[in-house]
Image (cartoon, rainbow, N blue to C red):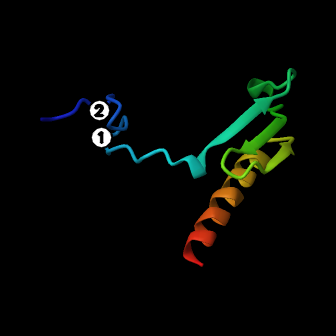
Amino acid sequence: MVQHPTSKRWTSDGRPRASLPTERAFVVQLRADADFGSGTVTGRIEHVSSGAAALFDSVEQLVAWMRDAVDRISTQRHE
């Protein structure tokens, strides 16, 4: 059976979707004045499984923090 590319099992470019492991779950809370259009993206992020949290003042900081958290999990698995 061929799945439609927009189904829950497939990405828009036809690749199968990977699982959503809880160790890669984050809660992102944006400040009331956050505005993606103007580039003002500030708030708080929390890594669900560890409880680690941080404030961020840009999309770059947000993504970097998430990358570091995922890298820490990967490193811990390989040790």
**Residue located at (62% from left, 71% from top):** 75
Residue 18 appears at what percent x and percent y? 40, 47
Q: Residue furthest top?
A: 32
**Residue located at (16% from left, 35% from top):** 2
**Residue located at (32% from left, 36% from top):** 9
* Disc number for residue 26: none
Which quarter of the image is occupied by the C terminus? bottom right
Residue 10 appears at what percent x and percent y? 32, 37
Q: Is residue 69 above or below residue 19?
A: below
Q: Is residue 22 above or below residue 3?
A: below
Q: Residue furthest bottom?
A: 79
* Residue bearing the label numbered 1: 14
Mark toward the start of the polypeptide (2 vs 1): 2
Which quarter of the image is occupied by the N terminus? top left
Horizontal side, residue 10 vs residue 27: left or right: left
**Could you classify mark 2 by the number of other residues whose Cα lies within 10 Å: few (under 14), some (14-19), or many (20 or more)?**
some
CA–CA distance in space, label 2 to label 1: 5 Å
Q: Nearer the viewer, residue 43 or 25?
A: 25
Q: Is residue 75 above or below residue 34?
A: below
**Could you classify mark 1 by the number of other residues whose Cα lies within 10 Å: few (under 14), some (14-19), or many (20 or more)?**
few
Q: Amino acid at mark 2?
A: Pro
* Residue bearing the label numbered 2: 5
* Badge 2 vs badge 1, beta-carbon distance below 8 Å: yes
Q: Residue furthest left?
A: 1
Q: Quadrant of residue 67?
A: bottom right
Q: Amino acid at mark 1?
A: Gly
How many discs mark residues in the rendered view?
2
